[in-house]
Image (cartoon, helix red, strand yellow):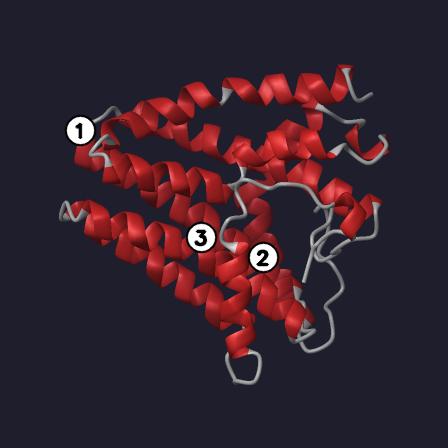
Amino acid sequence: MAKLPKQYQFLDVSDYGRSPGHWIADSLKNTRLTPIHVTTLFIVSGIMAIVCMLYSYNAAAALFLILKSILDAADGELARIKCTPSYTGRYYDSIADIILNFLFLLTFWYITDSSIILMLFAFIGIQLQGTVYNYYYVILRNTVKGDATSRVFEDTAPTAMEGEKQRTVNIFYRIYDILYIVFDKTIYFLDKDANNSKPFPKWFMTLISVFGLGFQLLFMAIMLLLDLEKYVIPFFIGYSILILVFIGIRRFVLK
C-alpha cells in the first residue's frame, strides 16, 4: 500500500526494499506476527551485519544490511495491510534505526582504524541527511493526505491509536525525542517555511531520496562487497554537503 496518492508518487531510489517488503508483509498478513515483530527482526538483521563485519565476512554483512532495509519496509507495509498503524511501532522503528546507524558507523570505525571524531561527524551527517529526506517526505504526505502516521512536527506525544496504550506511546515518544530532537530542530531551522509550500515536484523528491536510509545502507553494502569499507566514513562526511544544496533548491527554486 502506497504512502502517497498515485498522482504524487515518485521514483524513490532508497525504497528498493518496498516490493520484497510488501511480499513479506503479504505473506504475514494472516499470521500472528505484528509490525513490531518485523521491526525486531530488522534489528536482528542489523546486529548480524555488524557481527559479520567484525569477522570480515563482508558479503554476508552486505546481505544482512540489504535484508535490514527490506524488513524496514516490510513492517510499515504489514501495518497498512493489517490496518494496524501505531505510534508505538513508528517510534520503535525510528529508535532502532538511529541506534543501528550509530553502531554501523562505530563498526566501520573499528574495522578501518579510522578517527573516532570523523566517525562522529559521519554519524551526525548521516542523521541530518535522513532528517532532510524525512522532513520533506512527511510534509508532502501530510499536504496531499497520504500516510499520516508520521507528523511534520514531533513536539508532543500523540494520542494513542486504537490497540495501543497511551503510556507506551508516551515512553517511546520521549526516547524518540531525546534521540532525534537536535537533528529535527536543525533541519527545521534551515527551512522553516517548507511546510507552507505547494506539493513538492516528483523530480525534487527523487533527488532527496538519495538521503533515504535504504540508499545509505545500499552504499555501505556495496563498499563492503568491494572491500572499500575504509571509504564509508569519509563518504558520508562529504556527502553531507548536499544537505545545503537540497535545502537551497527548496528555498530558492521551489519557494
Cα–Cα span, label 2 and label 1: 33 Å
The amino acid sitting under disc 3 is Ser
Disc on res. 251: none
Residue 215 in picture, x, y percent from top left: 47, 39
Q: Is residue 253 left or right of residue 167?
A: right
Disc on res. 113: 1
Secondary structure found at label 3: helix
**Image quadrant in which you'd find residue 2:** bottom right
Cα–Cα span, label 3 and label 1: 26 Å
Residue 204 in picture, x, y percent from top left: 69, 29
**Image quadrant in which you'd find residue 35:** bottom right
Figure quadrant of the N terminus? bottom right
> Which residue carries the number 3 mark?
69
Residue at (73, 70) in percent of width and height:
161
Residue at (23, 34) in percent of width and height:
226
Secondary structure found at label 1: loop
The amino acid sitting under disc 1 is Asp
Residue at (70, 36) in percent of width and height:
136
Q: Is residue 122 left or right of residue 244?
A: left
The amino acid sitting under disc 2 is Tyr
Disc on res. 91: 2
Q: Nearer the viewer, residue 220 or 171?
A: 220
Badge 2 vs badge 1, beta-carbon distance below 8 Å: no
